[in-house]
Amino acid sequence: MQEEIIEIFKKTGALLEGHFLLTSGKHSNKYFQCAKVLQYPEYNEKIGAEIANHFRDFEIDTVVSPAIGGIVAGQEVARKLGKRFIFTERENGRMTLRRGFELRNGEKVLIVEDVITTGGSVFEVIEEVKRNNAVVVGVSSIVDRSNGKVNFQVPQFSAAVLFAETFEPEDCPLCKQGIPLVKPGSRKF
Ligand code: ZN
């Protein structure tokens, strides 16, 4: 359930509300760090179950995730579905199956990512799956931050959808209210 998952994000400090400087230079009222949730296996299990249940009736052979972010989530979804789990990683800039991981012709793949913002990594995994003549039957993530903009042309499911408001610094209402700006990842943060 979306509300329950958002509660977990807040409880684990994964979802912060305030006034944040994003890497894009924009300001936002929310900041999300997925790894903060996944440090607790019981929450990963709960969220993984939601994703696995959604895809329960799909024909799936293997779960594939992009490293590093997707690995913890994907492993859990695969465990719940009782399927094999492998991951892709970048080699010379290209998202690739390494470590002897293979996909056979026509193998049915569910892709699991932690956070989808632009969908870049997932699109790269889709390409790698296709290069191996396997088939992507679905894409899922713990969080969708794309505001529904990313369409992978296959069934999609995210355990939670996060809508963050972003502002240009010059017309940021939080600046106008004098709320201190925090840069996520900085030490005191
Ligand atoms: Zn601001």
Image (cartoon, rainbow, N blue to C red):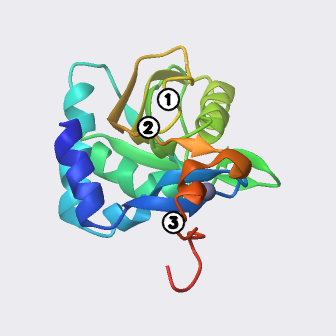
Q: Amino acid at mark 3?
A: Ile
Image quadrant in which the N terminus is located:
top left
Name the spot of residue 132 as percent of width and height, x first.
Answer: 64, 30
**CA distance separating discs 3 and 2:** 20 Å
Residue mark closest to the camera, 3 vs 1 = 3
Q: Nearer the viewer, residue 6 or 29?
A: 29
Q: Which residue is drawn at the image coordinates 49% and 38% (left, top)?
A: 145
User: What's the amino acid at mark 2?
Assistant: Phe
Mark 3 Cβ and ligand 1 under 8 Å apart: yes
Disc 3 to disc 1, C-alpha distance: 26 Å
Disc 1 residue type (three-letter):
Asn
Q: Which residue is mark 2?
A: 163
Kindly indicate whether the residue at mark 2 contacts the one at mark 1 (C-beta within 8 angstroms): yes
Q: Quadrant of ligand 1?
A: bottom right
Evaluate whether residue 99 shows in this view: no
Q: Nearer the viewer, residue 152 or 65?
A: 152
In the rendered image, the residue lying farthest to the front is 177
Q: Earlier in the sequence, mark 3 or mark 1?
A: 1
Residue identifier under label 1? 147
Question: What residue is rendered at 76% in x and 55% in y?
Answer: 91
Q: CA distance from mark 1 to mark 2?
A: 6 Å
